[in-house]
Image (cartoon, rainbow, N blue to C red):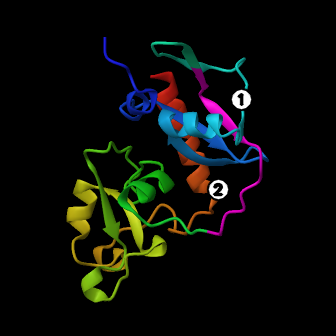
Amino acid sequence: MKYLDLHKYLKGMKKQVLLLNQDNTPLNIITVSKAYKLMTRDKVWVDDSNDCYELLSISKIVKIPKILILKYYVKLPYKKAAPSRQNILRRDQYCCQYCGTDLTNKDATVDHVTPRSKGGASSWVNMVAACRKCNLDKGNRTPKEAKIELKTKPKEPSYGFLFENMLITFRKKKDA
């Protein structure tokens, strides 16, 4: 039997670990490989009582917790969330901002309130989630010209918005 390199074995795994700052705020979702490196370098608190991944190597069983807390505080620079399609849909809670229907990832579109051809920017305050029908009906016009009204005025979300969505995504993957 060939020697199994634990680092190579871990790199191929798709399992994820939530990394928290010293004050328990979420920093990132990392791979099991990165988590193992942080554990071996004694940079995180390891609590085996939480949910753990049990990985078998030739010589031992390695337990990697699904949530790790750094032993030191990492100060993060202030970041703004990018107005991506996914973030716009999350901000608008997958609801069409013109007719109010619930959307799925397949039938959702992102509409520019002021069309780009009329000087509208691709920004938080000019983009909304819309169903295909409303987006086509509105076309290359402003809501006033198309005689339709927005349900809520678009605005830039707070930075906590990113963390909340990161945690929701992690919980969904953890439960799956």
Position above or below: 55 against 113 = above
Position above or below: 25 against 60 = below
Q: Write down the quadrant of residue 47 in the picture.
A: top right
Residue 131 percent across, percent down from the top left: 29, 53
Is 164 placed left or right of 119 in the picture? right
Residue shown at the point (52%, 65%) measured from the top left: 81
Residue 99 percent across, percent down from the top left: 37, 55
Report the amino acid beneath label 1.
Answer: Val
Label 1, residues with CA under 10 Å away: few <14, some 14-19, many ≥20: some
Q: Which residue is mark 1?
A: 46
C-alpha distance separating marks 1 and 2: 26 Å
SS at mark 2 in the image: helix
Q: Which residue is mark 2?
A: 160
Residue 6 percent across, percent down from the top left: 45, 27
Q: Residue furthest bottom?
A: 119
**Which stretch appears magenta?**
63-78
Q: Is residue 86 magenta?
A: no
Is 106 placed left or right of 99 in the picture? left
Report the amino acid beneath label 2.
Answer: Gly
Q: Write down the quadrant of residue 138 in the picture.
A: bottom left
Is 78 placed left or right of 115 in the picture? right
Position above or below: 75 against 141 = above
